[in-house]
Image (tube, rainbow, N blue to C red):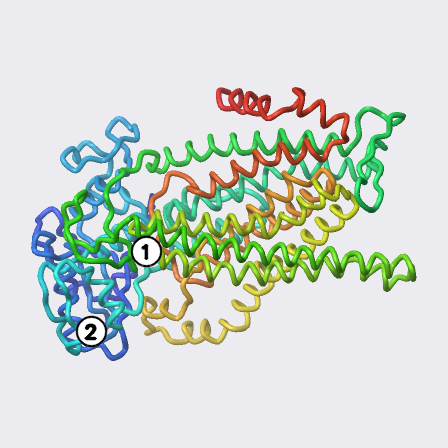
Amino acid sequence: MTSLGDKGSVQTQTKVLSQDSWTQVSCPCCVSKQVEPLVLIQLSDSVQPVTKRWLISLIETSKRHGGAALLAHPGEDECGDVVVVSAPRCTFLKATEDLGLCKKYHNEDMVAFSYHDRDNFSNVDDMQEFLTLAERQYIVKNELDSLQAQKKQRIPGIPEAPGVLEAWENICQKLVRAGVIKDIFPLHDQQRLNDLGRRWYSKKQIWGQPLDAIQSYFGSTVAFYFSFLDFYTWALVPPAFLGLVLTFLLPGGGGVVKEQAGEGAMEEDDDGPSVSGHMVQAVFSMLWSTLFIELWKRRSSSLSHRWGTLNLAERFAGPRPGFHGTLGLNPETGRLEPLFPEWQRQLRVGLVSLPLVGLLMGLVVLGMTCFYHGEALVQGFHQDSGSLFSGVLLYMPSMAHIVYTNMLGNVYHAVAMQLTEWENHREESSFQNHHTTKVLLFTFFNNFAVLFHIAFYKQDLPLLRKRLASMLIGNQLVNQCTEVVVPFIVDRFLSAPHKKEQEDDLEMDKLRAQRSLPPYPGLFAEYIELLLQFGYLSLFSCVYPLTAVLLLLNNITEIRGDAYKICKLFRKPFSAPVSNMGVWQTAFEVLGFVSVMSNCWLLPPRVRQFCLGGGISGKNIILFTILVEKL
């Protein structure tokens, strides 16, 4: 929740915008001495004043007359290219009930908010205490997105062809397509942002994040990511410690598994000791991955309860931006909106999306074949020469294949986005789930196919270890450059003149200055990186125990780097209330289950038979999971 200092920051921002220029409210309980600027609508430079006035009047009109029931400010003047938006108290309260958010009742319990029972909820008269800043900004964005034309009309100041607004057409989407609206984004509260930065990434402590403050300012979507990153980094300490012990105190893995180049490299030594470091790491990885997922699920539920998002309402949302179809009456919502038959969507998925995904996966196999061919060539060259140069060349096929997979991954990400857009999903959640599933499927195949082939088909542990080490070291170097070095250079050198200009110009409108920042790219790439890390660690760390050590060192800087970027280098993103990580949590659970089979297979043959036959089988892992959940 916002503190008293936050209110002071609101007063500072309000001074920039004349209080008398805000549109007025008709409800007596919504009258306020101060209005908090929340969202900025960036208009085209060539927008006509008549178009801007029409948009402002639409924003302030009540919902029953086709408006958004919000508050609008024209910015510096009536002819400018910005509109600042806020919301009155009643709009906030009604939207809180629609979203299904839980708030503190008079007895301090977290209860689903009800507008008719609003007087029994704590801080209901103070929106800065009742709702977080992220929730208030998301509500404003949600109300803007729900604007629909009541009848066919012409948008003032726009030529005839692109300026015709059809009945029940989404107004904001139409204005974006017509070039009137360039962007809509939430405004930073600079005082709160500076306070959060000092508590978050400026402190010298390695661990510990102000999760409640992050959730209040950036929303639960961002807060769940950083909470998971923090929890995952802490969880890396036990496997990292075990990896150091096995690497430096038990060299050679204990002698049970003899490593030889070529196929069939895993051989069991009957005269060796019964337990090796290889076996210990494999069994530990199976138990660790299962325990980690179950403990995170408990922590996730605890956080969603604390943040009031545990029981979000399942309501029929409006069509997402970009959805198109034939205008008709939706039988579930009773509203006129674009309709697109489900059978056509499934046809597009089955006849186009799936074949294209399969084709790109075929390119992964092609790259893997070239990798094996190059590996055989450098192995033969090294055996003939035995020089230092040939020893370095042994790693070239792996590095070349890593570059190939990264390039193919970038191409696939663009293709997956275009395919999902073409499938024309109505709901934003459906769009995100289909897009994420496509990318996850390809990412897993692209990054782990060669490792599975080496481990299960070739059974070549030395090659598997070398390949895994190459991928880890290469990825860590790239990540450190992108997560630490590049943000530092951008902030210290590229943005320095701009910062100096702001410091010298005391009259600069700080609200408008935020437009110079690039949009936040989202958390998709960050989750993909963590999923790959988790896969390397849980699936194959038994052949390279230092995996967790490298990941731990990377994530210590990852936490601060990601926090610094979202606070300093990008515009503030909108964040919808969520109860967990969504499809990402499912992906981690599936990967944790796969790790059980993978580690069992990497054990020596005699131990593998014992594990799969009843020692540490999938059934026993499931029983262990149930026990952890009950505890």
How many numbered marks are there?
2
- Tell me the CA gap for discs 2 and 1: 22 Å
* Rendered view: 441 above or below 390: above
Q: Which amino acid does label 1 sit on?
A: Asn
* Rendered view: 515 above or below 349: below
Q: In this view, does 386 lie to the left or right of 622?
A: right
Q: Find numbered disc 2 in the image and state the secondary structure of the residue it sits on.
A: loop
* Rendered view: 91 above or below 72: above
Q: In this view, does 239 lie to the left or right of 432?
A: right
Q: Is residue 109 left or right of residue 285?
A: left
* Rendered view: 524 above or below 286: below
The residue sitting at 14% across, 54% down in the picture is: 69
The residue sitting at 13% across, 60% down in the picture is: 149
Residue nearest the viewer, comparing 136 with 482: 482
Q: Position of residue 298 (x, y in %)?
A: 46, 30
Q: Where is residue 37 in the image (x, y as percent from the top left)?
A: 26, 59
Position of the N terminus, as image quadrant, is top left
Q: What residue type is labelled 2?
A: Pro
The residue sitting at 20% across, 58% down in the picture is: 326
Q: Where is residue 198 in the image (x, y as percent from the top left)?
A: 48, 53
The part of the image, by quadrant, that contains residue 502 is bottom left
Tell me if label 2 and label 1 are in contact, CB under 8 Å: no
- Sequence-wise, the earlier of marks 2 and 1 is 2
Q: Mark 1 highlights which residue?
A: 424
Residue nearest the viewer, comparing 318 with 600: 600
Q: Find numbered disc 1 in the image and state the secondary structure of the residue it sits on.
A: loop
Badge 1 local density, few (<14 within 10 Å), some, or many (20+)? many
Q: Mark 2 highlights which residue?
A: 162
Q: Which of marks 2 and 1 is in front?
A: 1
Residue 375's disc number: none
Q: Position of residue 357 (x, y in %)?
A: 49, 54
